[in-house]
Amino acid sequence: MDAQVGRRAGAPRGGTGWVALVGGGPGRPDLITVRGLELLRRADVVVVDRLAPRALLDDLGSGVEIVDAGKEVHGHNITQDQINRLIVDRAGRGLGVVRLKGGDPFVFGRGGEEALACLDAGVPCEVVPGVTSAVAVPALAGIPVTHRGITQDVTIVSGHLDPSHPGSTVDWDAVATGAGTIVVLMGVGALAQIAAELVKRGRAGSTPTAVIHGGGTADQQVVTGPLADIAALAAEAGIMAPSVIVIGDVVALREMLA
């Protein structure tokens, strides 16, 4: 398997292995849950994503096997099938495995696929929810995704595929014509297409929009502007992935809350 292995575990010990799918939160190491941190400290093997809080790995013992499963924008360090086989294999050797992800394991994190792989193999699997970046990153930038008197609903959309892609399953008509906040994850690369599609399908081009990179960190960048212009404004500011896009009247609250 072509995974990048940093530190290797010692000989497998007796007992039943286990897998924990741990949501690491939006990136800052201090935003992981107490349960997630507890399991991380008990792990023999950690399979870590690119956007997980990697600073937490520095405190692990030298015998912990670290597998880099980070997925790059235009390629994969290790495929999802390989990840599934790896976590099942290590647990089958009697080891404790933490699959450390950014955000929440079940919000565009493929945690469901990994949980099903463990179920099929008879491996004990615990899901530890994480603070999803869809809510946390806007909050850290002074934008609540819901607010009394403005909106009572929020839609979280994957922007991994632009709206014209035949593989996209997003109902863009429903997203565009809804009254609530839209949060787009993994959408910076297709921001121009997404904004144009939303305007074409009924969302006002004047809708306040924010693009947030590095939420809550020292490198945080926030660009705001009307939906029709946001792609050009983000490009001018050099906003890169990963970023969170927030579309809706709640964005205007940033002027008071940031």
Image (cartoon, helix red, strand yellow):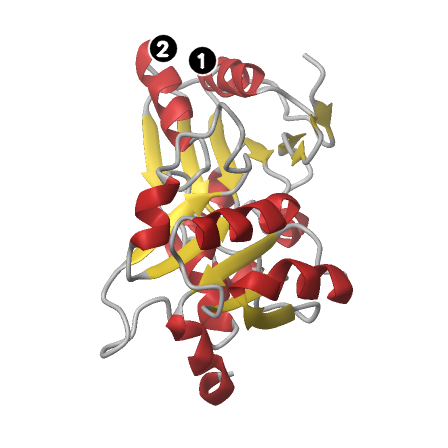
Give the mark toward the camera: 1 or 2.
2
The image position of residue 203, as x and y in percent, is: 40, 58
Q: What kind of element bears circle 1?
A: helix
Amino acid at circle 2:
Ala
Residue with the mark numbered 1: 92
132 up-or-down from 1: above or below: below
Callout 1: 10 Å neighbours few (<14), some, many (20+)?
many
Amino acid at circle 1:
Gly
Taking depth in this image into account, of 197 and 6 the one nearest to the observer is 197
The image position of residue 55, as x and y in percent, is: 65, 53
Residue with the mark numbered 2: 121
The image position of residue 36, as x and y in percent, is: 42, 48
Outermost residue, bottom side? 256
124 up-or-down from 120: above or below: below
Question: CB under 8 Å between callouts 1 and 2?
Answer: yes
One can see residue 143 in this view: no
Whole-Å distance between the Cαs marked 1 and 2? 9 Å
Callout 2: 10 Å neighbours few (<14), some, many (20+)?
some
Q: What kind of element bears circle 2?
A: helix
Picture disc at residue 249? none
Q: Which image quadrant is residue 34 in?
A: bottom left
Q: Which image quadrant is residue 48 in?
A: top right
Identify the image quadrant of the N terminus. Answer: top right
The image position of residue 193, as x and y in percent, is: 58, 45
At a point 65% along the width and 45% down the height, the residue shown is 189
At a point 50% along the width and 37% down the height, the residue shown is 163
Taking depth in this image into account, of 165 and 254 the one nearest to the observer is 165
Taking depth in this image into account, of 208 and 67 the one nearest to the observer is 208
